[in-house]
């Protein structure tokens, strides 16, 4: 497919690609907010389990759509919700499940990686 100077075949394909990326980010935003409440109510273990299932459902929706843009958009939001929630949960989970001898090291590594971003 020939591309223009922007790297996209047309303005329409550029808009579709930007929408696909933005919808995943929007889902991540709301998933991270929801995960904070779910972690308090149900615990991190069950929250991570449910969020990973939500992520898999989003992937299945995207795959089952067979190129239909509505399915891709919907699947991206659902998958983003799972990704955002999972990324908000494990920061303290890795420290709490680690042996006491290396819990402090994990805390320092996660804090330094967050502050460097």
Image (tube, rainbow, N blue to C red):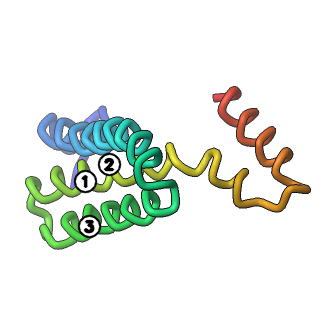
Dot 3 corresponds to which residue? 57
Q: Quadrant of residue 17?
A: top left
Residue 84 appears in view = no
Q: Residue at x 64, y 46 (%)?
A: 92
Rendering coords of residue 104 (x, y %): 84, 45
> Measured from the top left, where is residue 43 in percent x and y?
49, 54
Q: Give the secondary structure at mark 3.
A: helix
Closer to the N terminus: mark 3 or mark 1? 3
Q: Which residue is mark 1?
A: 78
Q: In the shown orientation, is residue 105 left or right of residue 66?
A: right
Residue shown at the point (43%, 66%) measured from the top left: 49
Labelled disc at residue 63: none
Q: Which residue is mark 2?
A: 81
Q: Few, some or many C-alpha atoms within 10 Å of disc 3 (few <14, some 14-19, many ≥20)? A: some
Tag count in the figure?
3
| SS class, disc 2 | helix
Q: CA distance from mark 3 to mark 1?
A: 7 Å
Q: Are marks 2 and 1 in contact (CB under 8 Å)?
A: yes
Measuring from the top left, give residue 98's x and y in whole percent: 77, 60
Q: Secondary structure at mark 1?
A: helix
């Amino acid at each position: 497919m020939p591309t223009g100077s922007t790297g996209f075949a047309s303005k329409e394909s550029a808009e579709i690609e930007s929408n696909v990326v933005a919808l995943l980010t929007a889902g991540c935003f709301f998933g991270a907010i929801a995960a904070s409440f779910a972690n308090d109510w149900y615990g991190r273990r069950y929250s991570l389990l449910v969020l990973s299932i939500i992520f898999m459902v989003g992937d299945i929706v995207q795959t089952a759509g067979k190129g239909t843009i509505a399915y891709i958009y919907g699947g991206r939001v659902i998958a983003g919700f799972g990704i955002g929630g999972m990324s908000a949960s494990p920061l303290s989970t890795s420290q709490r499940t680690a042996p006491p001898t290396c819990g402090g090291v994990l805390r320092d590594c996660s804090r330094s990686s967050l502050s460097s971003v």
